[in-house]
Amino acid sequence: MNTEPTFSNPASKPSVISVSALNNAVAQLLERNLPLTWVSGEISNFTRAASGHWYFTLKDQAAQVRAVMFRGRAQYADFQPREGDKVEVRALVSLYAPRGDYQLSVEAIRRAGVGNLYEAFLRLKAQLEQEGLFDVTRKRPIPSFVRCIGIVTSLQAAALRDILTALKRRAPHIAVVLYPTPVQGEGAAAKIAQAIATANAREECDVLLVCRGGGSMEDLWAFNEEIVARTVAHSQIPVIAGIGHETDFTITDFAADLRAATPTAAAELAATPRTEWLDLLARQAQQLQRAQTRLLNEQQQTLDWLTRRVQSPAAAIAARRQQLQQTSQSLSFAARQQWQHSRHALSQLAQALHNQTPDTAGRSTQLQQWRQRLSHASQSRLQQQHQTLTHLQAQLELLNPQRTLERGYAILSDGKGRALRSPAQLQPGSAVRVQLAQGSAQLGIASIQTSLDEQ
């Protein structure tokens, strides 16, 4: 649907727009011309819807305006407003078109007057936490038995009376040392830190209470200063912080070794009641008495047992002599048994050695026989090989070409030294070489005659 008003030609009749279009146009006009703004006022008619949205009226002495904070923004608020709370809201001015009501659309909310202080509180808290000043591992344990408690607070503070009353009621035996200091106003933080440093320098207390009563954030601001937080964190004396009411938190609470909800609670945490110590001492005295009685009874029983075991020196010597004789006999018997066992074992080993000794005479005779047989076999084999060699030599001599030449034969070969076996290999007028038994000669071929078999 078009939300912009439309106008016809001036010559025609005047244009008419719907209420919805008018409200949407006004809403867009407000959102475009009024930026995101911080607005302060008092909460009235606060309602938290089932959807999680917050609806309330923001007013001052002369005017009021409706406001809404949707669930997506409200879930990040660090407190829920109540009737009459002074707050500051960061909001856009808008128009709720269905009813035509102008309202604030809230994106952030904080308590009035503490916005800057709270932001400074968060910045310092994040810085010191990143440095490890609030780390649980560096916190000192509170002593179980305290003989002296130091209190850092104002002489006029109601918290001091509450602490002293609680200590007198619970532990009147504990000494109290007061380190007076202003707890609010200009320069209070430095004086609080100086009081804590003085307590550490004097080393007369077992635990230190840093306390003051409730108040606004401005009233408690001295305990949010960095100098106080660092002095508390580096104190050699364990520190219990009891500042404000249960819902109040300061930087000192995080830096202290233990936080108490109130100053009175700090006193109760520092001192165990005198009645509890007396009850504990009574129980321990009873336990000690029972332990002593039990030990005495056990010692008496031990004495009776030892008395029954005591005997005369003569009886003791006789018993020892008899024991010595028995031991001597046992030793003699054991020695004879061992000697006999060793002799039997030696005899068995000698027999085993004899059984394992080789028969050298028989082996020597057998070796001589094998040597004679080997010599005879070698001679027979040698004669046989000599006969074979003589026979082969005779056969080789028969096949020797020189013997054939000596019987009148000759070997013909051509100029290349190849043997001539057939007339077909000869040519008239060619030269051949004739090998005789005692030399060779060159012959010329005059004519060639072939045998009838070759014709």
Image: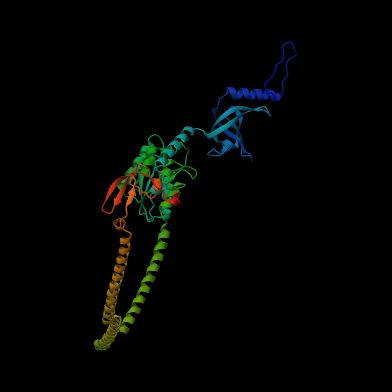
Which residue is rendered at x = 40% and y = 55% of the image? 171
Q: Position of residue 310 (x, y in %)?
A: 29, 84
Q: In the displayed orientation, state which residue is furthest to the right.
A: 13
Q: How many marks?
A: 0
Q: How is the image coloured?
A: rainbow
- Give 128 or 262, whichever is nearer the viewer: 128
Measured along the vertical axis of the image, is residue 49 above or below residue 320?
A: above
- Left or right relative to 165: residue 438: left
Q: Position of residue 208 (x, y in %)?
A: 37, 48
Which quarter of the picture shows residue 359?
bottom left
Q: Position of residue 323 (x, y in %)?
A: 27, 87
- Give 302 or 292, whichever is nearer the viewer: 302
Measured along the vertical axis of the image, is residue 124 above or below residue 406?
A: above
Question: Does any portion of residue 150 appear in the rendered image?
Answer: yes
Which residue is rendered at x = 73% and y = 19% of the image? 16
- Give 45 or 427, whichever is nearer the viewer: 427
Q: In the displayed orientation, state which residue is furthest to the top.
A: 11
Which residue is rendered at x = 51% and y = 33% of the image? 112
Identify the image quadrant of the N terminus: top right
Which quarter of the picture shows residue 426?
top left
Which residue is rendered at x = 48% and y = 44% of the image? 245
- Left or right relative to 117: residue 194: left
Question: Does any portion of residue 312 appear in the rendered image?
Answer: no
- Left or right relative to 86: residue 243: left
- Give 66 or 97, whichever is nearer the viewer: 97
Q: Position of residue 83 (x, y in %)?
A: 58, 37
